[in-house]
Amino acid sequence: MHELSLSGAIVDTVERHADGRRVTVVNLRIGTLRQVVPDSLDFYFDFVSKDTVCEGARLEVEVVEAELRCQECGAERALASPPFTCRACGSSDVMVVAGNEFEVESIEIEEDACIART
Amino acid sequence: MHRTYVRVAEDVLDANTTIAHANRADFDRAGVAVVNLMSSPGAGKTTLLERTLRGFDAVRVGVLEGDIATTLDADRIALLDVPVTQINTDVKFGGECHLDANMVRSAIPAIPLDEIDLLLIENVGNLVCPAEFLVGEDHRVMVWSVTEGEDKPLKYPLMFRTCDLVLVNKIDLIPHLDVDLDRFHRHLDAVHPDVPRMLVSAKTGEGIDAWRDWLVHTSHREHQHPHEHAHA
């Protein structure tokens, strides 16, 4: 039921920015360190978005690879799997600089045809 | 009809984090240190609390119990004459498998904050979701028991990375198992290098004094220096 609650949070976030307009696409950035199953997210999003401006919207997920920065030697590296240590100097004093994202980057909305402005 | 792109750039869990900060502010104002205790179901959280709190008077403790259903855990803690409040996520919150900041906020009025110095929140048994949701705690402690498999840190890195302390429980069972504790420690260090850990047995009481000392130290430190740490 984890993706259910996350989907609800996505809808809440999007509704605030959609300002009543119909949403067609929700662009998400999800880091590889987050525990999200995209298929489950799609399923639950369809469910929770009914009767909201998000109904029928498509989720597009940009996967952000995890990256560490070593606080000792400054080296940066992509993290495919544990260990969370610096490959250059072996230090465990590392900071996760990418991979924890779970954000709505942007949305696409439908607007009525523009009234020509002069 | 035409399509417009709107930049949002907002963390999906922002709303929860905002409420968590509000909870933390309320707890700080009341001078209460808060520990979020997490684990898989059956790791021994409640039994550990019973063992820890029986006759423990160095610090005034309250407990907030989180379960999907039943008040079984709160009933057990109530027998120890410790103020305890139960949240059932299936009552108002759709049966969620974890506590979130909103649920904890809804329980605050029922917690006697002026009568306690330390609040222990026993989260819903689950190695996945509770790690994602801050609830207003100062510290996160997770319990791994020796029957669960040494590979769990590798399989559930977020849970093991997000905690400040790992309690290794049920060490009394080690002679009856094929568990390799060194391998567990290596796996834990791979995902959360050098995270503090304590070996305990809720059954025999081994290691409980050190855990109690940690709780006392944590409670006193929060009162002297609130807001000193943040969660990654």
Image (cartoon, coloured by chain):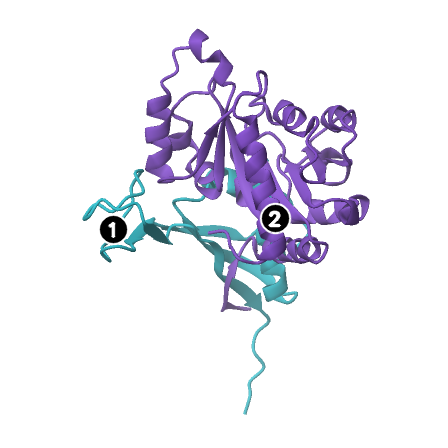
Chain colours: A cyan, B purple
Q: According to the image, label 2 marks what residue? A: B220
Q: Residue at x 43, y 9 (%)?
A: B175
Task: Locate the N terminus of chain B and report the quarter of the image it occupies.
Answer: bottom right
> Residue A72: image x %, image y %?
26, 54
The residue under the point 38% across, 11% down is: B178
Q: Is residue A112 above or below residue A33?
A: below
Residue at mark 1: chain: A
Q: Tell me if B91 is positioned left or right of B186 in this view.
A: right
Which residue sits at x=41%, y=37%?
B157
Q: Is residue B46 above or below residue B16?
A: above
Residue B159 circle label = none
Residue B225 location, x and y as percent?
Answer: 57, 57
Identify residue type, mark 1.
Arg
**Tag 1, which secondary structure?**
strand
Pick the front one: B29 or B56 = B56
**Can you see residue A54?**
no
Q: Nearer the viewer, residue B173 or B116?
A: B116
- Would you say A22 lies left or right of B185 here? right
| Identity of the residue furthest to the front in this view | B58
Q: Measure the C-alpha gap from mark 2 to mark 1.
A: 39 Å
Judged left or right of residue B111, residue A108 is: left
Q: Give the residue pinned by disc 1.
A: A77
Q: Nearer the viewer, residue A93 or A114?
A: A93
